[in-house]
Image: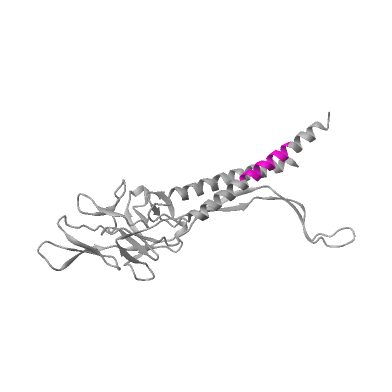
């Protein structure tokens, strides 16, 4: 009946509205360092089974196909795409890009698990000389790395060593290491904003270690990893979503006309 068409089209509009929100967020973050685009996944809903394939008729012939009427669609999830973003060279000594797999670790409150993970390498120093994220929260890197205020010639090596030269010295001193974390399933991480992710049962337990070891990426100083959002693809998805929205709207109009016609048959 047309009522099923109304419900299916309504579910399509709801799912497409969610897809539009995801696309809009991707485009809004096209310049966010280390941002990873999300993809909207859809799945169909239950079916009304009117005829089952393989049943036999009165002539004992087997039915080659079934007769099913679907009840619509829903968004099954949003999938993070952890493809590498292009390095954007800044020349700032505290900017760092991970070339390959891995996440920087930062401290967060106990309510968020104590440790969060990020691909954004725009760092700064707080008043105590600790290396922190250069955002409104200033989350500290883990393990904590402190650099004296009078340090010069700050260097971050490819394996994550943070080195500086103290006044009156010609040798560099190691302040600490940028340890990286990897996950069995990074797409299962929880997004909490601030360019941060937290561990979930789906992501698996992180493995931490030095950059460049055990298939972890290396560190490139003086650059930031750009967002991996492809504006052209997102705009194409935006147009496709808009056209699909219009088609589902037309389905609702057609179903409404059918129901109006049926209601007028009694007159």
Image coords of residue 7 (percent x, y):
67, 42
Viewer-side residue, 183 vs 7 = 7
Viewer-side residue, 124 vs 93 = 93
Q: Would you say residue 248 sits in the magenta stretch?
A: yes
Residue plotted at (31% across, 48% down): 135
Viewer-side residue, 156 vs 104 = 156
> Looking at this rendering, what residue extends furthest in the top direction?
267
Which residues lie in the magenta part? 245-256
Residue 262 sits above or below residue 65 on the image: above
In this picture the colour scheme is: one colour
Image coords of residue 203 (percent x, y):
45, 59
Secondary structure character of the magenta stretch overall: helix
Residue 54 sits above or below residue 237 on the image: below
Residue 136 sits above or below residue 35 on the image: above
Q: Would you say residue 131 sits in the magenta stretch?
A: no
Q: Quadrant of the C terminus?
A: top right
> Looking at this rendering, what residue extends furthest in the left direction?
168
Image coords of residue 49 (percent x, y):
74, 52
Residue plotted at (55% across, 53% down): 236
Residue plotted at (48% across, 56% down): 230
Residue 1 lies in quadrant: top right
Q: Number of marks in the image?
A: 0
Image coords of residue 252 (percent x, y):
68, 40
Left or right of residue 118, residue 250 in this image: right
């Amino acid at each position: 009946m047309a009522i099923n068409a109304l419900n299916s089209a309504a579910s399509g509009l709801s799912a497409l509205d969610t897809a539009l929100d995801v696309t809009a967020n991707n485009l809004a973050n096209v310049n966010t360092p280390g941002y990873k685009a999300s993809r909207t996944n859809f799945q169909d809903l239950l079916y009304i089974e009117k005829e089952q394939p393989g049943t036999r008729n009165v002539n004992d012939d087997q039915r080659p196909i079934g007769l099913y009427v679907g009840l619509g669609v829903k968004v099954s999830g949003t999938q993070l795409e952890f493809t590498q973003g292009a390095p954007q060279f800044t020349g700032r000594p505290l900017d760092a890009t991970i070339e390959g797999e891995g996440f920087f670790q930062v401290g967060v409150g106990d309510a968020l698990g104590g440790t969060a993970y990020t691909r954004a390498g725009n760092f700064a120093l707080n008043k105590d000389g600790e290396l922190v994220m250069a955002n409104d929260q200033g989350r500290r890197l883990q393990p904590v790395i402190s650099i004296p205020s009078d340090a010069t010639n700050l260097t971050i090596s490819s394996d994550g060593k943070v080195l500086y030269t103290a006044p009156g010295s010609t040798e560099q001193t190691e302040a600490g290491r940028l340890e990286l974390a990897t996950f069995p399933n990074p797409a299962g991480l929880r997004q909490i904003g601030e360019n941060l992710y937290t561990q979930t049962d789906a992501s698996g337990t992180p493995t931490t270690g030095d950059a460049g070891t055990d298939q972890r990426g290396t560190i490139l100083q003086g650059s930031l990893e750009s967002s991996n959002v492809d504006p052209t693809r997102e705009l194409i998805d935006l147009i496709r979503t808009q056209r699909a929205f219009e088609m589902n709207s037309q389905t609702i109009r057609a179903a409404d006309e059918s129901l109006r016609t049926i209601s007028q048959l009694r007159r």
